[in-house]
Amino acid sequence: GAGVSQSPRYKVAKRGQDVALRCDPISGHVSLFWYQQALGQGPEFLTYFQNEAQLDKSGLPSDRFFAERPEGSVSTLKIQRTQQEDSAVYLCASTGLGNYEQYFGPGTRLTVT
Amino acid sequence: LAKTTQPISMDSYEGQEVNITCSHNNIATNDYITWYQQFPSQGPRFIIQGYKTKVTNEVASLFIPADRKSSTLSLPRVSLSDTAVYYCLVYSGAGSYQLTFGKGTKLSVIP
């Protein structure tokens, strides 16, 4: 079946604009994760959903970042009033319940100018 | 979460076996050692996971000594397509199941 997909693959935003990044997890995967990856660094955890419940949002860097997964499948990461330091690749991963292997999407590269 | 330390970069010729060692001195009893691979412009991909001794799959082997304070990822007969960043992670499997990545080891395979 299809893997994790993310859209758009590339996004350029002017500072101050709001952006929305979409993640389509593997069908049936209960858990969904968002990570942020700066250039030359490893991914850093942002937030975690189990079905529609956001169980951990400890990695969100500021209250400008908001994530949702209203029906327990597709998730959206929203960044309000983007800043240059938000420029990064945003990765989404999903996994089945009780499974430790996370399946990552290709990421969305966000550039804030 | 236990911190991991691994070399920043490694070079290898095609056809050689590559061993990447990772230290995780503060690993907890319930922690597992997990390795992911990441190619440019792609998300990380799971390679292998182990708790102790040796684990082997079709891609790699993972060696974990008895004290579990380190682990070695072994890639047999690497090819150019194995050029990637390899991340060693300690996975607790508790709480939110988040993965904590370090900077990884950039492996360059030379023809």
Image (tube, coloured by chain):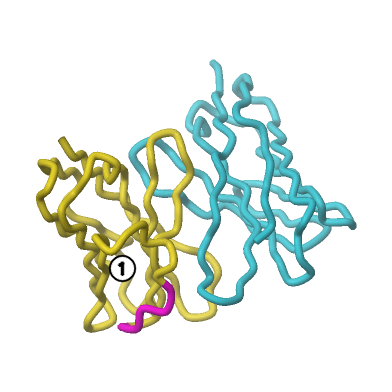
Chain colours: A yellow, B cyan
| Magenta-span inclusion, residue A54 | yes
Instruction: Find the magenta span and give its range.
Output: A52-56
Q: Looking at the picture, does residue B58 appear above or below residue A39?
A: below
Q: Is B102 on the left-hand or right-hand side of B25?
A: left
| Residue at position x 75%, y 45% in the image | B23
The picture places residue A86, in percent across and down from the top left corner, at: 27, 46
| Residue at position x 55%, y 17% in the image | B110
The picture places residue B61, in percent across and down from the top left corner, at: 71, 48
The picture places residue B6, in percent across and down from the top left corner, at: 67, 38
Q: Is B64 on the left-hand or right-hand side of A85?
A: right
Q: Looking at the picture, does residue A47 appear above or below residue A98?
A: above
Query: What residue type is disc 1 on?
Result: Pro
Q: Specify few, some or many for label 1: CA neighbours under 10 Å numbering under 14, 14-19, or 20 or more.
A: many
Considering depth in this image, is B4 or A85 the residue closer to the camera?
A85
| Residue at position x 69%, y 44% in the image | B73
| Residue B32: quadrant of the picture | bottom right
- Name the quadrant of the C terminus of chain B: top right
The residue identified by callout 1 is: A25
Q: Looking at the picture, does residue B12 appear above or below residue A25?
A: above
Q: Looking at the picture, does residue A86 appear above or below residue B78?
A: below
